[in-house]
Amino acid sequence: MTAQVRVLIAVLTSLSLLAASLSGGKGSLQFYVVDVEGGNATLIITPSGESLLLDTGHLNAAARDAGRIIEAMNDAGVKQIDHLITTHWHLDHFGGMAELARQVPIREFIDHGPSIQRNTKADAFLKNIYPALYGKAKRTIVKPGDTIAITDLDVVVVTSAGKTIRAPLPAGGGPNTYCTDYSQPVADTSENSQSIGIHVRFGRFRAIHLGDLSADKEFQLMCPENRLGTVDLFIVSHHGQPNSNTKVLVDAIESRVAIMNNGIRKGGEPEVMKVIYSAPGLENLWQLHFSQLSGQEYTVPGIFIADLADRPQPTVPVDPMPPPAARTVQPPAPAHNGKAYWIKVSARQDGSFTVTNTRTNFSKTYRARS
């Protein structure tokens, strides 16, 4: 073989690998952050086709949200959910489960155990419906430090049932300097504090998803040492609300990309937006919705926003809308029950990844960290 032929083969091989890398196809790890209107549904598909779903959307819109999850499954080419994590027992996180299970097989149901917060609808679901669902499959109650057995991935439970990992992950450890000027928050006694949080590793790529983990549990997880280390992808906690997403977490993990599963009038508040925008190492924030609570002052460019209202607003105020006061009647938020778009992440083992807004077909590729 001549030197010229060897060079040509090397060039063609490099171009082929580059094309596969940019396409985010075979061999990549897929994240679908599905729009369930300020609830949560995040679908993860491994290169071998194994599926992990975190949460199933709203109880009050179960058919809509299950349908949106199934659309993402169809795009990924999977026919079942191998592992379903319900991060906690709030209606916007478990609400589509029964409807989804009616339409597709779910092989394993994963949760943190009983709810600590009384709610008539949640209590009825846990007593009368949930046992019938996992009775046909497998139920696993996880604690911090447990791993979830998924081909191609290392998935570690870092928070569950109000507890956090005590020993750092292999990439974590060392003092968290952001804890110095931050005091222990007031304890959250709601289900948010019980959220299952996971750390996902795929080669050199790392991501975290902490559900609606409350500020006091973020403090326990991240102080005085950073037990997580740095990550590439942060699925923003609690829809981008200020009772989560403290600087001791957001700054310390130094995520390159953050994706916020907010609603039109839920999450994206100025306090959180300022924390995320100022986080060290952040390159871009992507959002499932424009937030009226951000206004133009704090929102990201529309090219990074996946979904609009069914009737797009002709104008958007510059100033953020104040969050509705508790127990007050407010005009309803603009509806979005029509076509929904997801934000998709295609990650590769070298640590590079591509994020795509399926509404605009805009993609951006992030090179592996050196």
Image (cartoon, grey):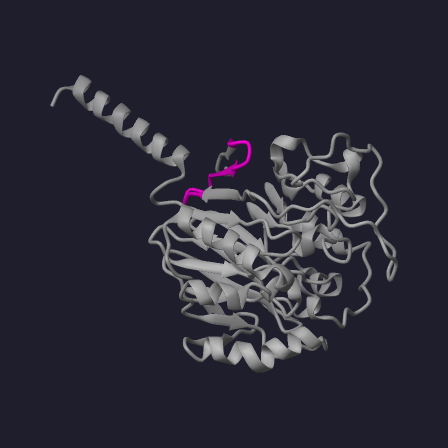
Relative image position of residue 362 (x, y in whole percent): 53, 31
In this view of the protein, which residue sits in the foreground, 19 or 75? 75
Please name the residue shown 53% across and 70% down the image: 145
Range of residues picked out in magenta = 347-362
Q: Residue furthest top?
A: 4
Is 360 within the magenta? Answer: yes
In this view of the protein, which residue sits in the foreground, 138 or 237? 138
**Quadrant where the image shows the N terminus:** top left
Relative image position of residue 338 (x, y in whole percent): 59, 45
Residue 212 visible? The answer is: yes
Is 5 within the magenta? Answer: no
- Number of marks present in the image shown: 0
Relative to 200, 238 lies left or right = right
Relative to 201, 159 lies left or right = right
Q: Is residue 312 above or below residue 325?
A: above
Q: Quadrant of residue 23?
A: top left
Q: Residue furthest bottom?
A: 127
In this view of the protein, which residue sits in the foreground, 273 or 201? 273
Please name the residue shown 67% across and 74% down the image: 121
Residue 85 visible? The answer is: no
Relative image position of residue 245 (x, y in whole percent): 72, 53
Q: Residue furthest left?
A: 1
In this view of the protein, which residue sits in the foreground, 162 or 130? 130
Please name the residue shown 76% across and 56% down the image: 179
Relative to 172, 101 lies left or right = left
